[in-house]
Amino acid sequence: MILVLGVGAAVLVFSNEPGDIESGAKEGSIVNIILSENKESSEQKNILDSLTTLKMAYDQAILEKTALSKELELERKNVENLMEIIKVSNNPSSAQIKIYRNQLSDLNSSLQSRVLEVKKLKSQNKNLLTEIESQNVVMYKQKAENDTLMLKQKKLESTLKDASKLSLSNFKVIALREKSSGAELETNKAKNTKKLKASFTVNGNAVAKSGKRVYYIQVLDQKNTVLGDNKLIEFGNDKALVYSFIVSTDFQGKSNNVYGILNADENPFKKGTYFVNFFDKQEIMGSASITLE
């Protein structure tokens, strides 16, 4: 009796072992598949997270607005395209995950390379701006010096112009009568006056240019009528003058006494006061007067 039971038990044990092994193998295979799927799903999510971070890095690099902005925008588009591909990929295989990781690595390496180029460009731009600022400072200083020199030159030219300008003095007018011998004597009688003599001195000036100088004499009677030639001359700057006669002198740097004569001719001088103005072109240089009795 005891032997039979032992044999039965042995048979039972041996008959159950193959089923247990097969069942265990199946369960192990399912677990491996689930683990593999979970691992690949986790890696897919990690790659998407990395791509999101990479896209943000591209966004930041593009904001720098350098010469590489267009290229960075194209590469950011590649990142976005890969993200879309991965998002629609269901249960990617290990081979696909490997491809995604390789593409992620390439995009990341490209970004690192671009970032270095951006830093280099920014450094070059900074150096260029510094150089431009330095040049601007130099140019500003040069302009200030040029402006100062021009101002000094204008002042010097003005000073030289004023210094070279001739001045007149000793303005005088006298009435002359003639004796039968031809001699001329000064008079104050209108009936005896044959001519008016207007004289002045051109003062010496070593700086002034030598040569012929012309002056205009204007004689006015009691009615402010211009006597003598009564001619109009225009000076080309909207200035004009009516003069009685012209006198000229050859200026050679030294003082020179100059005079001019207004003859009575057919119009004898009348009693009253006569005014004489002396002009250098349109500029009045002095005046004198005489009263004939």
Image: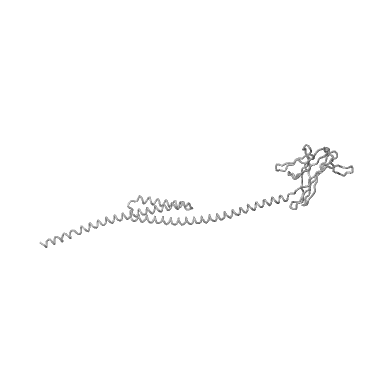
Q: Is residue 24 left or right of residue 214?
A: left
On the image, which quarter does residue 278 sit in?
Answer: top right
Residue at the outermost left position: 1
Residue at the outermost bottom position: 3
Q: Quadrant of the C terminus?
A: top right
Number of callouts:
0
Residue at the outermost top position: 223
Nearer to us in this view, 100 or 161? 161
Q: Quadrant of the N terminus?
A: bottom left
Image coords of residue 23 (percent x, y): 22, 56
Nearer to us in this view, 123 or 201? 201
Image coords of residue 239 (percent x, y): 71, 42
Q: Is residue 192 left or right of residue 242?
A: right
User: Is the image coloured rainbow, by chain, by secondary structure, or in one colour?
Assistant: one colour
Nearer to us in this view, 124 or 248? 248
On the image, which quarter does residue 106 sit in?
Answer: bottom left
Q: Is residue 145 left or right of residue 166?
A: left
Image coords of residue 26 (percent x, y): 24, 56
Q: Is residue 90 left or right of residue 200?
A: left
Q: Is residue 258 above or below residue 2?
A: above
Image coords of residue 180 (percent x, y): 89, 42
Q: Is residue 292 above or below residue 87?
A: above
